[in-house]
Image (spheres, rainbow, N blue to C red):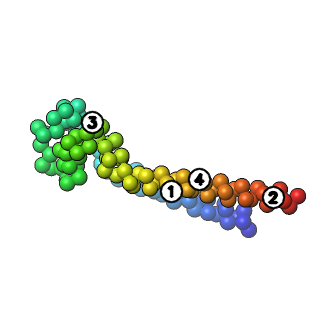
Amino acid sequence: MKKFLAIFCTGCIILCCIYAAVDLGKMDRTYDPSRVTTPVYELQQDPDSFDDSKADGAAAAIVQQNLSKTHTLNDVTSIVFDFRGYDTMGEAFILVTAVAGSAVILSMGKKKEDGDE
């Protein structure tokens, strides 16, 4: 019964993934690299000279205030480690906890098997 349940659940997950992939393939692209006209290096060197009136609040803050607030030249690094540092630290803590918990559970199962023999 356990084997059937495992195969059934795996099949359901695979079918859901296939459905999601086909559905995502039908959607319009959200990024078109041929339309990118902003020179990234010049934007990084002098962000105040570019028009960001069409950008939403977060994008405008990143472009205009990144260098003055974080003193980091790389926008991605400044977001991950300066603006979202506690969030990133929390995600790392959850990952380490999950790995440690999995190791404890797997080692307990091995000890039970050794004790039964």
Which residue corresponds to the image point at 57% horizontal and 62% vertical from the top-left?
Answer: 12
Picture layout, residue 84 above or below residue 7? above
Residue bearing the label numbered 1: 94
Mark with earlier residue (4, 1): 1
Residue bearing the label numbered 4: 99
Which residue corresponds to the image point at 79% horizontal and 60% vertical from the top-left?
Answer: 112
Residue 39 seen in render: no
SS of the residue at dot 3? Answer: loop
Residue bearing the label numbered 3: 73
- Amino acid type, residue under disc 2 in the picture: Glu
Answer with left or right where residue 3 lies relative to residue 85: right
- Amino acid type, residue under disc 1 in the picture: Ile
Where is residue 28? Give x, y as percent.
31, 50
For the N terminus, the quadrant is bottom right
Answer with left or right where residue 81 lies relative to residue 64: right
- Amino acid type, residue under disc 3 in the picture: Leu
At label 4, counting other C-alpha atoms closer than 10 Å, the crowd grade (few under 14, some 14-19, many 20 or more) is few
Give me the C-alpha separation between circle 4 and circle 2: 21 Å
Where is residue 8? Give x, y as percent.
64, 63
Residue 25 seen in render: yes
- Amino acid type, residue under disc 4 in the picture: Val
Picture layout, residue 6 above or below residue 44? below
- Pointer 2 with pointer 1, Cβ within 8 A: no
Which residue corresponds to the image point at 25% horizontal and 39% vertical from the top-left?
Answer: 71
Mark with earlier residue (4, 2): 4
SS of the residue at dot 1? Answer: helix
For the C terminus, the quadrant is bottom right
